[in-house]
Amino acid sequence: MRLAICVAAIGMAMMSSCGTAETQSVDKASVVIENIMTRKSVRAYDGREVEPKVVETLLRAGMAAPTAMNRQPWDFVAVTDKEVLEKLAAEPALSRAPVSKNCPLVIVVCGNMEKAAEGKGQEYWIHDTSAATENILLAAHAMGLGAVWCAGQPNEDRIEALRNVLGLPSYVTPLNLICIGYPAEEPAVKDKWKEENVHYNKW
Protein backbone atom coordinates (compact mmCIF):
# COMPACT_ATOMS: atom_id res chain seq x y z
CA MET A 1 0.00 0.00 0.00
CA ARG A 2 2.81 2.39 0.94
CA LEU A 3 4.57 1.63 -2.34
CA ALA A 4 1.41 2.34 -4.38
CA ILE A 5 1.03 5.69 -2.60
CA CYS A 6 4.69 6.45 -3.32
CA VAL A 7 4.31 5.72 -7.05
CA ALA A 8 1.14 7.81 -7.22
CA ALA A 9 2.85 10.67 -5.40
CA ILE A 10 5.73 10.61 -7.87
CA GLY A 11 3.27 10.81 -10.76
CA MET A 12 1.40 13.71 -9.16
CA ALA A 13 4.63 15.58 -8.48
CA MET A 14 5.70 15.19 -12.08
CA MET A 15 2.30 16.30 -13.36
CA SER A 16 2.34 19.43 -11.22
CA SER A 17 5.75 20.45 -12.54
CA CYS A 18 4.85 20.08 -16.23
CA GLY A 19 2.56 21.91 -18.59
CA THR A 20 -0.22 20.17 -20.51
CA ALA A 21 1.94 20.02 -23.65
CA GLU A 22 4.24 17.65 -21.76
CA THR A 23 1.52 15.34 -20.43
CA GLN A 24 2.42 12.54 -22.81
CA SER A 25 6.04 12.68 -21.68
CA VAL A 26 4.93 12.58 -18.05
CA ASP A 27 2.75 9.55 -18.76
CA LYS A 28 5.76 7.73 -20.20
CA ALA A 29 7.84 8.66 -17.17
CA SER A 30 5.12 7.38 -14.83
CA VAL A 31 5.11 4.03 -16.63
CA VAL A 32 8.89 3.75 -16.24
CA ILE A 33 8.76 4.62 -12.53
CA GLU A 34 5.90 2.15 -12.01
CA ASN A 35 7.92 -0.57 -13.73
CA ILE A 36 10.95 0.07 -11.52
CA MET A 37 8.94 0.22 -8.30
CA THR A 38 6.93 -2.96 -8.95
CA ARG A 39 9.68 -5.26 -10.21
CA LYS A 40 10.18 -8.32 -8.02
CA SER A 41 12.03 -11.63 -8.07
CA VAL A 42 9.97 -14.45 -9.59
CA ARG A 43 11.23 -18.01 -9.10
CA ALA A 44 8.45 -20.20 -10.56
CA TYR A 45 7.30 -20.27 -14.18
CA ASP A 46 4.49 -21.87 -16.16
CA GLY A 47 6.84 -23.45 -18.71
CA ARG A 48 5.69 -21.50 -21.78
CA GLU A 49 8.41 -20.70 -24.29
CA VAL A 50 9.77 -17.17 -24.32
CA GLU A 51 9.47 -16.11 -27.95
CA PRO A 52 12.74 -15.48 -29.85
CA LYS A 53 11.81 -11.83 -30.54
CA VAL A 54 11.24 -11.31 -26.82
CA VAL A 55 14.62 -12.89 -26.04
CA GLU A 56 16.28 -10.52 -28.51
CA THR A 57 14.51 -7.54 -26.93
CA LEU A 58 15.83 -8.58 -23.51
CA LEU A 59 19.36 -8.84 -24.89
CA ARG A 60 19.06 -5.47 -26.63
CA ALA A 61 17.94 -3.98 -23.31
CA GLY A 62 21.01 -5.45 -21.64
CA MET A 63 23.33 -3.98 -24.25
CA ALA A 64 21.72 -0.56 -23.86
CA ALA A 65 23.20 -0.28 -20.35
CA PRO A 66 25.83 2.31 -19.43
CA THR A 67 29.39 1.07 -19.78
CA ALA A 68 32.67 2.61 -18.61
CA MET A 69 34.70 4.04 -21.52
CA ASN A 70 32.16 2.34 -23.80
CA ARG A 71 34.17 -0.88 -23.53
CA GLN A 72 31.00 -3.01 -23.50
CA PRO A 73 32.93 -5.85 -21.81
CA TRP A 74 29.99 -8.19 -21.86
CA ASP A 75 28.79 -11.35 -23.53
CA PHE A 76 25.43 -13.00 -23.02
CA VAL A 77 24.61 -16.69 -23.24
CA ALA A 78 20.88 -17.18 -23.86
CA VAL A 79 19.93 -20.75 -22.97
CA THR A 80 16.64 -22.13 -24.31
CA ASP A 81 17.67 -25.70 -25.15
CA LYS A 82 15.99 -28.10 -22.72
CA GLU A 83 19.00 -30.38 -22.44
CA VAL A 84 21.28 -27.50 -21.50
CA LEU A 85 18.70 -26.18 -19.04
CA GLU A 86 18.52 -29.65 -17.47
CA LYS A 87 22.31 -29.73 -17.14
CA LEU A 88 22.24 -26.35 -15.39
CA ALA A 89 19.46 -27.56 -13.08
CA ALA A 90 21.49 -30.69 -12.23
CA GLU A 91 24.57 -28.75 -11.11
CA PRO A 92 24.76 -28.85 -7.27
CA ALA A 93 26.47 -25.44 -7.21
CA LEU A 94 23.46 -23.93 -9.01
CA SER A 95 20.81 -25.57 -6.83
CA ARG A 96 19.58 -22.23 -5.49
CA ALA A 97 18.83 -21.00 -9.01
CA PRO A 98 15.25 -22.00 -9.95
CA VAL A 99 16.20 -23.48 -13.35
CA SER A 100 14.25 -26.64 -12.54
CA LYS A 101 10.97 -24.80 -11.90
CA ASN A 102 9.71 -24.88 -15.51
CA CYS A 103 12.23 -22.21 -16.46
CA PRO A 104 12.28 -21.86 -20.28
CA LEU A 105 15.05 -19.26 -20.53
CA VAL A 106 18.28 -18.52 -18.73
CA ILE A 107 20.45 -15.57 -19.69
CA VAL A 108 23.99 -15.80 -18.35
CA VAL A 109 25.56 -12.34 -18.18
CA CYS A 110 29.32 -12.56 -18.58
CA GLY A 111 32.33 -10.29 -18.37
CA ASN A 112 34.81 -10.69 -21.21
CA MET A 113 38.31 -9.74 -20.05
CA GLU A 114 39.49 -9.43 -23.64
CA LYS A 115 37.05 -6.54 -24.07
CA ALA A 116 37.54 -5.02 -20.60
CA ALA A 117 39.91 -2.17 -19.80
CA GLU A 118 43.42 -2.93 -18.63
CA GLY A 119 44.82 -2.58 -15.11
CA LYS A 120 42.50 -1.56 -12.29
CA GLY A 121 39.97 -0.41 -14.88
CA GLN A 122 39.33 -4.04 -15.75
CA GLU A 123 37.11 -4.32 -12.67
CA TYR A 124 34.62 -1.93 -14.27
CA TRP A 125 33.26 -5.01 -16.04
CA ILE A 126 31.36 -5.81 -12.85
CA HIS A 127 29.64 -2.42 -12.88
CA ASP A 128 28.83 -2.68 -16.58
CA THR A 129 27.40 -6.20 -16.47
CA SER A 130 25.41 -5.37 -13.33
CA ALA A 131 23.81 -2.43 -15.14
CA ALA A 132 23.06 -4.72 -18.10
CA THR A 133 21.48 -7.25 -15.74
CA GLU A 134 19.15 -4.69 -14.21
CA ASN A 135 18.10 -3.55 -17.68
CA ILE A 136 17.20 -7.14 -18.55
CA LEU A 137 15.22 -7.58 -15.32
CA LEU A 138 13.25 -4.38 -15.92
CA ALA A 139 12.59 -5.23 -19.56
CA ALA A 140 11.37 -8.69 -18.55
CA HIS A 141 9.00 -7.21 -15.98
CA ALA A 142 7.70 -4.67 -18.50
CA MET A 143 6.85 -7.48 -20.94
CA GLY A 144 4.93 -9.55 -18.40
CA LEU A 145 7.75 -11.98 -17.65
CA GLY A 146 9.08 -13.02 -14.27
CA ALA A 147 12.81 -13.12 -13.60
CA VAL A 148 15.36 -13.52 -10.83
CA TRP A 149 19.06 -12.61 -10.59
CA CYS A 150 21.18 -15.54 -9.34
CA ALA A 151 24.82 -14.80 -8.61
CA GLY A 152 27.76 -16.42 -10.34
CA GLN A 153 30.66 -14.11 -9.46
CA PRO A 154 32.34 -14.30 -6.91
CA ASN A 155 31.27 -17.88 -6.08
CA GLU A 156 33.98 -20.06 -7.63
CA ASP A 157 31.86 -23.23 -7.58
CA ARG A 158 29.08 -21.52 -9.54
CA ILE A 159 31.53 -19.95 -11.96
CA GLU A 160 33.10 -23.35 -12.61
CA ALA A 161 29.70 -25.00 -13.05
CA LEU A 162 28.63 -22.41 -15.60
CA ARG A 163 31.96 -22.69 -17.41
CA ASN A 164 31.64 -26.47 -17.61
CA VAL A 165 28.04 -26.57 -18.84
CA LEU A 166 28.29 -23.64 -21.27
CA GLY A 167 31.87 -24.06 -22.45
CA LEU A 168 32.92 -20.58 -21.37
CA PRO A 169 36.55 -19.70 -22.18
CA SER A 170 38.95 -18.83 -19.35
CA TYR A 171 38.84 -15.09 -20.11
CA VAL A 172 35.06 -14.98 -19.64
CA THR A 173 33.59 -14.75 -16.13
CA PRO A 174 29.85 -15.25 -15.53
CA LEU A 175 28.53 -12.50 -13.30
CA ASN A 176 25.19 -14.23 -12.91
CA LEU A 177 22.44 -16.25 -14.48
CA ILE A 178 18.99 -14.72 -14.89
CA CYS A 179 16.13 -17.23 -14.79
CA ILE A 180 13.24 -15.92 -16.91
CA GLY A 181 9.76 -17.16 -17.80
CA TYR A 182 6.07 -16.43 -17.68
CA PRO A 183 5.24 -16.33 -13.96
CA ALA A 184 3.50 -19.17 -12.14
CA GLU A 185 3.54 -17.12 -8.93
CA GLU A 186 2.82 -13.55 -7.98
CA PRO A 187 5.11 -12.60 -5.10
CA ALA A 188 4.40 -9.42 -3.22
CA VAL A 189 6.31 -6.32 -4.20
CA LYS A 190 8.80 -5.28 -1.51
CA ASP A 191 8.93 -1.66 -0.47
CA LYS A 192 12.64 -1.14 0.11
CA TRP A 193 12.50 2.61 0.76
CA LYS A 194 14.25 3.52 4.02
CA GLU A 195 14.67 7.20 4.70
CA GLU A 196 17.52 6.51 7.13
CA ASN A 197 19.61 5.21 4.22
CA VAL A 198 19.60 8.61 2.53
CA HIS A 199 22.14 11.36 3.23
CA TYR A 200 21.92 14.82 1.68
CA ASN A 201 25.09 16.80 0.97
CA LYS A 202 27.16 14.99 3.60
CA TRP A 203 26.99 11.91 5.84
Image: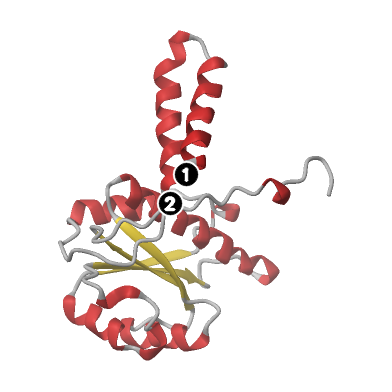
For mark 2, give the secondary structure: loop
Tell me what residue is drawn at x 54 percent, y 59 percent. Answer: 128
Residue 97, position in %: x, y?
A: 37, 76
Tell me what residue is drawn at x 23 percent, y 52 percent. Answer: 54
Q: Which of 144 and 172 is in front in this view?
A: 144
Tell me what residue is drawn at x 70 percent, y 51 percent. Answer: 197
Q: Name the residue under label 1.
A: 37
Q: Is residue 191 above or below residue 20?
A: below
Q: Which of 103 and 169 is in front in this view?
A: 103
Residue 190, position in %: x, y?
A: 48, 53
| Kind of residue at disc 1 | Met
| Kind of residue at disc 2 | Val
Q: Indicate the colouring scheme.
A: secondary structure
Q: Which of 130 and 103 is in front in this view?
A: 103
Q: Specify the farthest residue to the right.
A: 202
Q: Marks 2 and 1: in contact by CB < 8 Å?
A: yes
Q: Specify the farthest residue to the top.
A: 20
**Image side of residue 52 versus residue 6, left or right:** left
Residue 153, position in %: x, y?
A: 52, 76
Q: In this view, does 29 lie above or below 41?
A: above
N-terminal-most mark, 1 or 2: 1
Q: How many labels does the image show?
A: 2
Of the numbered discs in the image, which one, if any, rests on residue 103? none
Q: Name the residue under label 2.
A: 189
Residue 102, position in %: x, y?
A: 21, 71
Tell me what residue is drawn at x 21 percent, y 67 percent. Answer: 104
Q: Which of 179 and 40 is in front in this view?
A: 40
Q: Dot 2: within a 10 Å radius of its alpha carbon, few (fewer than 14), some, or many (20 or more) residues?
A: some
Q: Distance between the residues labelled 1 and 2?
A: 8 Å
For mark 1, give the secondary structure: helix
